[in-house]
Image: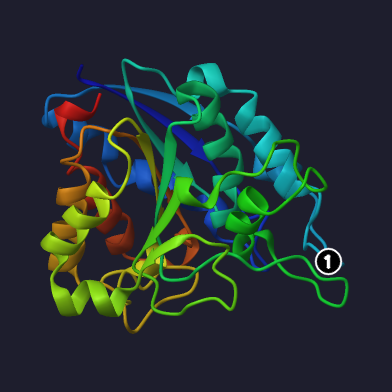
Amino acid sequence: MNKIHIFGIPSSAGALFKGTEWSPYAIREAGLMDRLVEAGWKVEDFGNIVSSDEMLRHNVGPVRNWPSPRMIWEATVNQTETLFSNDAFTMILGGDCSIEVGTFTAFKKTYGENSHLLVVDGHVDTVHPRGDACIGAAGMGLWFLTQDKKVWWTEEPTPPQSISIIGPHTLSENDCGINILPLAELKHEGIVGKIKSHLASIPSDNKILVHLDVDVLHESIMPSAYSPSQTGLNRNEALELFNNIFSDPRVKGIEVTEFSAQKDDNGESAKMIVDLLSLVKMNQA
């Protein structure tokens, strides 16, 4: 198959500051569809799943802007039959990190329990809600997926072994039992060998959704990340990483998050994202 379906989730519901809601527009304007068509793909853009203008914002604990994050997840799951299909590769343009709760729920409804969320992120988003603090859902997505008992979300918890994380430069106090490949290990031992070994550790019958938080990239190539990193992947490392990830035919979709498009005055960050997404291979769809 040679089809790609594009969707936008223009949301900053999980964040303190706005900015990521402009990202789907910016990535499209950077020429994503043209690049994919030039590579031989048949591309259909389904527009945006939600409108960020409709979302409530506040700074009242324990979860900032609640219930806006859940509204995003519900709207995403309602699009499950369109969002993922066996005959097309899915690209989701976010959005803050918390969208992963809705997207992976929809992914599992399509591909069943043999689904894997491969998170490429500079952080480990397993912060849990606390009554004495107000925290954004962008830092809680993996906690909601693996630990929530239908208090905040409608679904049964995802087994931790169905999620893995590549590239964090800071670790969490609680990894929720998730397999983590830290950035330092990835750089020290070599990207090709480590990513191939990591992919091989995922059961062969699994289908994979990739979650990209652009703060895994060094600020020299991604200054417009919501939280720019001074220790992330450089351009060559990022291209090498995603070339290998996209070489795995089990990968059925990717979502891009934490790109604060309003900071991207020259469009270079959006172009970097397009360069990475353009590495997708025909064997995926």
Q: Amino acid at mark 1?
A: Pro
Residue occupied by mark 1: 62
273 relative to 249 in the view: left or right: right
Does residue 232 appear in this view?
yes
Looking at the rendering, in which quadrant would you find the C terminus?
A: top left
228 relative to 50 in the view: left or right: left
Residue at the (23%, 71%) spot, across then down: 186
Say how many tags the image has.
Answer: 1
Which image quadrant is residue 89 in? top left
The vertical placement of 86 against 66, above or below, is above
Does residue 220 appear in this view?
no
* Local SS, label 1: loop
Residue at the (11%, 31%) spot, across then down: 39
- In terms of depth relative to the viewer, which is nearer, 13 or 130? 130
Looking at the rendering, in which quadrant would you find the N terminus?
A: top left
The vertical placement of 49 against 267, above or below, is above
The vertical placement of 120 against 250, above or below, is below
Horizontal and vertical percent position of residue 222 = 32, 69
Q: Residue furthest bottom?
A: 230
Residue at the (13%, 71%) spot, across then down: 190
- In terms of depth relative to the viewer, which is nearer, 139 or 71? 139
Horizontal and vertical percent position of residue 79 = 58, 23
Residue at the (66%, 39%) spot, across then down: 73
Other-residue count near label 1 (Cα within 10 Å), few / some / many at <14 / 14–19 / ≥20 = some
Q: How is the image coloured?
A: rainbow
61 relative to 71 in the view: left or right: right
Which image quadrant is residue 76 in? top right
